[in-house]
Amino acid sequence: MLSVLTLAPASALAEPEQPVPGVTYVFATVDAYSVKRESFEITGTLVGENTPRVFYFGTWHSSFPDSNSVEATRCDRLALLAMTRPGRYLLSWTVEAYYGTLTCTLARQ
């Protein structure tokens, strides 16, 4: 059992990082994407890095939490596309500090 745990990637065992509000995180690859009612969790490799990281993007501080569902649906499609073609697209993700507004962008590399 111990050997299995030591062979697992560090990102699989790591606690999700809390991103800095207002900072855009650009993922060169997306390994996993999880949607919850008021949060999103992305596992992937940021541009310029070699090791996957896990980020927890919470939008619970939004003034209108239900308004994030439309954006989340659109971001789902972009994240899935980035997952199917690793290294071909860059997925950018930002949650604004004050309103909790979600912004995601997909660009060709």
Image (cartoon, rainbow, N blue to C red):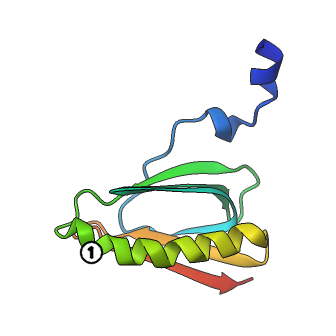
Percent coordinates x, y for residue 18 in the rendering: 43, 49
Percent coordinates x, y for residue 79 in the rendering: 60, 70
The residue where tag 1 is placed is 67
Percent coordinates x, y for residue 35 in the rendering: 47, 57
> What residue is at 33 percent from the left and 57 percent from the top?
38
> What residue is at 35 percent from the left and 62 percent from the top?
21
In the displayed orientation, state which residue is furthest to the bottom: 108
Query: What amino acid type should be assigned to the residue bearing mark 1?
Result: Ser
In the displayed orientation, state which residue is furthest to the top: 2
> What residue is at 57 percent from the left and 48 percent from the top?
54
Percent coordinates x, y for residue 107 in the rendering: 65, 85
Judged left or right of residue 26, residue 109 is right
**Residue 109, picture quadrant:** bottom right
**At numbered mark 1, what does the secondary structure look like: helix, strand or loop?**
helix
Q: Which of 62 and 77 is in front in this view?
A: 77
**Residue 88, picture quadrant:** bottom right
Q: How crowded is mark 1: few (under 14 residues within 10 Å), some or many (20 or more)?
A: few
Q: Which of 92 and 76 is in front in this view?
A: 76
Quadrant where the N terminus is found in the figure:
top right
> What residue is at 69 percent from the left and 72 percent from the top?
82
Relative to 108, residue 62 above or below: above
Judged left or right of residue 7, residue 27 is left
Relative to 33, residue 76 above or below: below
Relative to 77, residue 17 above or below: above
Counting every numbered tag in the picture gives 1
